[in-house]
Protein backbone atom coordinates (compact mmCIF):
# COMPACT_ATOMS: atom_id res chain seq x y z
CA UNK A 1 0.00 0.00 0.00
CA UNK A 2 1.96 2.99 -1.31
CA UNK A 3 -0.58 5.65 -0.24
CA UNK A 4 -0.20 8.83 -2.32
CA UNK A 5 2.64 8.91 -4.83
CA UNK A 6 3.88 11.89 -6.82
CA UNK A 7 6.24 12.21 -9.78
CA UNK A 8 8.66 13.75 -10.34
CA UNK A 9 10.32 14.53 -7.00
CA UNK A 10 12.29 17.46 -8.41
CA UNK A 11 12.01 19.53 -11.56
CA UNK A 12 13.70 22.60 -12.97
CA UNK A 13 11.92 24.48 -15.75
CA UNK A 14 12.71 27.55 -17.77
CA UNK A 15 10.12 30.32 -17.94
CA UNK A 16 7.50 29.48 -20.53
CA UNK A 17 8.01 25.71 -20.48
CA UNK A 18 5.16 23.38 -19.65
CA UNK A 19 4.98 20.28 -17.52
CA UNK A 20 2.57 17.93 -15.80
CA UNK A 21 2.85 16.79 -12.21
CA UNK A 22 1.45 13.34 -11.66
CA UNK A 23 -0.34 12.06 -8.57
CA UNK A 24 -1.86 8.67 -7.81
CA UNK A 25 -3.46 7.13 -4.72
CA UNK A 26 -4.21 3.49 -4.01
CA UNK A 27 -6.60 3.97 -1.08
CA UNK A 28 -9.78 4.16 -3.18
CA UNK A 29 -10.37 7.71 -1.99
CA UNK A 30 -13.00 9.86 -3.64
CA UNK A 31 -11.47 13.31 -3.14
CA UNK A 32 -8.10 14.55 -4.31
CA UNK A 33 -6.34 17.89 -3.90
CA UNK A 34 -3.37 19.88 -5.16
CA UNK A 35 -1.63 22.31 -2.81
CA UNK A 36 1.41 24.49 -3.06
CA UNK A 37 3.62 25.27 -0.08
CA UNK A 38 5.67 28.45 0.02
CA UNK A 39 7.74 29.89 2.87
CA UNK A 40 5.67 32.33 4.90
CA UNK A 41 2.50 31.48 2.94
CA UNK A 42 1.71 28.05 4.33
CA UNK A 43 -0.31 25.60 2.28
CA UNK A 44 -2.63 26.96 -0.37
CA UNK A 45 -5.16 24.95 -2.33
CA UNK A 46 -4.81 25.11 -6.11
CA UNK A 47 -7.55 22.73 -7.30
CA UNK A 48 -9.50 19.84 -5.92
CA UNK A 49 -11.66 17.02 -7.21
CA UNK A 50 -14.56 15.60 -5.22
CA UNK A 51 -14.99 12.63 -7.53
CA UNK A 52 -13.89 11.21 -10.86
CA UNK A 53 -14.82 13.61 -13.63
CA UNK A 54 -15.23 16.70 -11.44
CA UNK A 55 -12.75 19.44 -10.58
CA UNK A 56 -13.06 22.77 -8.79
CA UNK A 57 -10.83 25.79 -8.25
CA UNK A 58 -9.18 26.45 -4.94
CA UNK A 59 -7.55 29.62 -3.65
CA UNK A 60 -4.79 29.99 -6.25
CA UNK A 61 -5.82 28.32 -9.55
CA UNK A 62 -4.38 30.85 -12.01
CA UNK A 63 -1.70 29.39 -14.26
CA UNK A 64 -2.70 25.79 -13.57
CA UNK A 65 -4.99 23.15 -15.02
CA UNK A 66 -5.95 19.78 -13.62
CA UNK A 67 -7.30 16.47 -14.85
CA UNK A 68 -8.95 13.79 -12.77
CA UNK A 69 -8.09 10.95 -15.12
CA UNK A 70 -9.80 8.25 -13.08
CA UNK A 71 -10.45 7.59 -9.42
CA UNK A 72 -6.75 6.96 -8.72
CA UNK A 73 -5.03 9.74 -10.66
CA UNK A 74 -5.14 13.54 -10.47
CA UNK A 75 -2.63 15.52 -12.52
CA UNK A 76 -1.61 19.18 -12.35
CA UNK A 77 -0.43 20.97 -15.48
CA UNK A 78 1.55 24.18 -15.80
CA UNK A 79 1.02 25.40 -19.35
CA UNK A 80 3.57 28.23 -19.32
CA UNK A 81 5.70 28.18 -16.21
CA UNK A 82 6.58 31.42 -14.42
CA UNK A 83 9.14 32.07 -11.65
CA UNK A 84 6.21 32.77 -9.28
CA UNK A 85 5.30 29.10 -9.62
CA UNK A 86 8.52 28.03 -7.94
CA UNK A 87 7.21 26.06 -4.99
CA UNK A 88 6.76 22.66 -3.42
CA UNK A 89 3.61 20.96 -4.72
CA UNK A 90 1.69 18.43 -2.67
CA UNK A 91 -1.06 16.12 -3.78
CA UNK A 92 -3.48 14.82 -1.14
CA UNK A 93 -6.49 12.56 -0.98
CA UNK A 94 -9.32 11.88 1.45
CA UNK A 95 -12.06 9.31 1.70
CA UNK A 96 -15.05 11.62 1.98
CA UNK A 97 -16.18 14.70 0.03
CA UNK A 98 -14.41 18.04 0.65
CA UNK A 99 -17.42 19.55 2.40
CA UNK A 100 -17.49 16.72 4.95
CA UNK A 101 -15.14 17.58 7.82
CA UNK A 102 -14.64 14.13 9.32
CA UNK A 103 -11.96 12.83 7.02
CA UNK A 104 -8.25 13.37 7.35
CA UNK A 105 -6.16 14.02 4.28
CA UNK A 106 -3.28 11.84 3.16
CA UNK A 107 -0.40 13.66 1.50
CA UNK A 108 2.17 12.64 -1.06
CA UNK A 109 5.90 13.35 -0.60
CA UNK A 110 5.83 16.47 -2.77
CA UNK A 111 7.41 17.79 -5.96
CA UNK A 112 9.99 20.54 -5.60
CA UNK A 113 9.68 22.78 -8.68
CA UNK A 114 12.04 25.57 -9.62
CA UNK A 115 11.26 27.91 -12.52
CA UNK A 116 14.18 30.01 -13.73
CA UNK B 1 -15.33 31.49 6.60
CA UNK B 2 -12.80 29.56 8.60
CA UNK B 3 -9.61 31.02 9.97
CA UNK B 4 -6.86 29.67 12.14
CA UNK B 5 -3.93 31.17 14.01
CA UNK B 6 -0.81 29.57 15.35
CA UNK B 7 0.66 32.43 17.36
CA UNK B 8 4.20 31.04 17.55
CA UNK B 9 6.34 30.60 14.46
CA UNK B 10 8.87 28.62 16.46
CA UNK B 11 8.81 26.68 19.70
CA UNK B 12 12.01 25.46 21.32
CA UNK B 13 11.95 22.90 24.08
CA UNK B 14 14.54 20.70 25.77
CA UNK B 15 14.28 16.94 25.32
CA UNK B 16 12.29 15.39 28.15
CA UNK B 17 10.36 18.58 28.89
CA UNK B 18 6.66 18.98 28.12
CA UNK B 19 5.73 20.80 24.94
CA UNK B 20 2.74 22.84 23.81
CA UNK B 21 2.00 24.10 20.31
CA UNK B 22 -0.86 26.59 20.28
CA UNK B 23 -3.79 26.92 17.89
CA UNK B 24 -6.83 29.17 17.93
CA UNK B 25 -9.56 29.04 15.32
CA UNK B 26 -12.70 30.70 14.07
CA UNK B 27 -15.49 28.75 12.38
CA UNK B 28 -19.24 29.04 11.97
CA UNK B 29 -20.84 26.00 13.47
CA UNK B 30 -19.43 23.00 15.29
CA UNK B 31 -15.73 22.63 14.68
CA UNK B 32 -13.80 19.55 13.79
CA UNK B 33 -10.14 20.12 14.54
CA UNK B 34 -7.07 18.42 13.18
CA UNK B 35 -3.34 18.47 13.78
CA UNK B 36 -0.86 17.46 11.09
CA UNK B 37 2.92 17.10 11.28
CA UNK B 38 5.46 17.63 8.50
CA UNK B 39 8.94 16.17 8.83
CA UNK B 40 11.72 17.60 6.65
CA UNK B 41 11.26 16.94 2.93
CA UNK B 42 8.03 15.01 3.51
CA UNK B 43 4.32 15.59 3.03
CA UNK B 44 1.97 16.36 5.90
CA UNK B 45 0.92 13.47 8.12
CA UNK B 46 -2.27 13.27 10.14
CA UNK B 47 -1.60 13.33 13.90
CA UNK B 48 -4.99 13.54 15.62
CA UNK B 49 -8.48 14.99 15.39
CA UNK B 50 -11.30 16.22 17.59
CA UNK B 51 -14.83 15.50 16.44
CA UNK B 52 -16.98 15.46 19.56
CA UNK B 53 -17.00 14.20 23.13
CA UNK B 54 -14.00 14.23 25.44
CA UNK B 55 -12.09 17.50 25.18
CA UNK B 56 -8.75 15.70 25.45
CA UNK B 57 -7.87 13.80 22.30
CA UNK B 58 -4.99 11.35 22.07
CA UNK B 59 -3.11 10.75 18.83
CA UNK B 60 0.00 9.27 17.32
CA UNK B 61 3.50 9.34 18.82
CA UNK B 62 2.27 10.25 22.33
CA UNK B 63 0.71 13.55 21.29
CA UNK B 64 -2.57 14.82 22.64
CA UNK B 65 -4.63 17.95 22.12
CA UNK B 66 -7.09 19.82 24.28
CA UNK B 67 -10.23 21.33 22.81
CA UNK B 68 -11.45 24.46 24.61
CA UNK B 69 -14.72 25.71 23.18
CA UNK B 70 -14.90 28.95 25.18
CA UNK B 71 -11.38 29.97 24.16
CA UNK B 72 -11.76 28.52 20.64
CA UNK B 73 -8.43 26.79 21.05
CA UNK B 74 -7.01 23.38 20.25
CA UNK B 75 -3.49 23.24 21.67
CA UNK B 76 -1.21 20.31 20.91
CA UNK B 77 0.70 18.82 23.84
CA UNK B 78 3.14 16.10 24.72
CA UNK B 79 4.31 15.33 28.27
CA UNK B 80 7.92 14.54 27.33
CA UNK B 81 9.45 15.82 24.09
CA UNK B 82 11.83 13.79 21.92
CA UNK B 83 14.43 15.13 19.51
CA UNK B 84 12.60 13.19 16.80
CA UNK B 85 9.49 15.36 17.42
CA UNK B 86 11.30 18.26 15.73
CA UNK B 87 9.11 19.14 12.75
CA UNK B 88 6.55 21.60 11.41
CA UNK B 89 3.07 21.33 12.97
CA UNK B 90 -0.13 22.51 11.32
CA UNK B 91 -3.53 23.05 12.89
CA UNK B 92 -6.57 22.68 10.60
CA UNK B 93 -10.15 23.62 11.53
CA UNK B 94 -12.94 21.93 9.61
CA UNK B 95 -16.71 22.44 9.54
CA UNK B 96 -19.53 20.85 7.58
CA UNK B 97 -19.88 22.56 4.18
CA UNK B 98 -16.97 24.83 5.04
CA UNK B 99 -13.62 25.69 3.48
CA UNK B 100 -12.15 22.38 4.42
CA UNK B 101 -8.77 23.00 2.95
CA UNK B 102 -7.50 25.72 5.28
CA UNK B 103 -4.39 25.01 7.31
CA UNK B 104 -2.72 27.18 9.90
CA UNK B 105 0.59 28.85 9.03
CA UNK B 106 2.56 26.18 10.88
CA UNK B 107 4.73 26.16 13.99
CA UNK B 108 8.28 24.88 13.82
CA UNK B 109 9.09 22.76 16.86
CA UNK B 110 12.73 22.25 17.76
CA UNK B 111 13.54 19.80 20.51
CA UNK B 112 17.05 20.31 21.76
CA UNK B 113 19.08 17.39 23.14
Image (tube, rainbow, N blue to C red):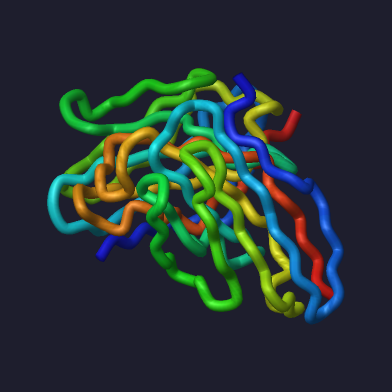
Extreme-left residue of the structure: B29
Please state the horizontal and vertical placement of residue B63, each as a whole percent of the image: 47, 25
**Image spot of residue B39 (x, y percent):** 67, 37
**Vertical relation: A27 (above or below) A20:** above
Please give the name of the residue rendered at 18% of the width and 44% of the height, measured from the top-left corner. B69
Asked where in the image residue B74 lies, by quadrant, the reply is top left
Whether residue B6 is visible, yes or no, is: no
A92 sits left or right of B83 in the view: left
- Image coordinates of residue A63 in percent, x first then y, are 60, 76
Task: From the viewer's side, name the closer residue of B33 and A112.
Answer: A112
Q: Nearer the viewer, residue A107 or A68?
A: A68
Residue at left offset 39%, top offset 48%: B92
Q: Residue at x 70, y 28 (%)?
A: B83
Q: Nearer the viewer, residue B7 or A41?
A: A41
Residue at point 65% right, 36% down?
Answer: A5
Q: Quadrant of residue A4?
A: top right
Tell me, yes or no, if residue A11 can be seen here: yes
Q: Quadrant of residue B43?
A: top right
| Quadrant of image for the N terminus of chain B | bottom left
Is A6 in front, or is B67?
A: A6
Q: From the viewer's perspective, is residue A13 above or below residue B79?
A: below
Q: Where's the C terminus of chain B, which quadrant?
A: top right
Left/right of residue B82 with respect to residue A48 in the rendered view: right
Q: Position of residue B54 (x, y in %)?
A: 20, 24
Amino acid sequence: NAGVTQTPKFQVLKTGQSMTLQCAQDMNHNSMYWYRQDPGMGLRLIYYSASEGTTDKGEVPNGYNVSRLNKREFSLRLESAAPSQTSVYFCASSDGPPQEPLYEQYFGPGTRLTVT
Amino acid sequence: AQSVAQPEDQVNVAEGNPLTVKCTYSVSGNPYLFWYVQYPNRGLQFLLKYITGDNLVKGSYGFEAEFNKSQTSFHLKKPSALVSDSALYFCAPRVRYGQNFVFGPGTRLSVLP
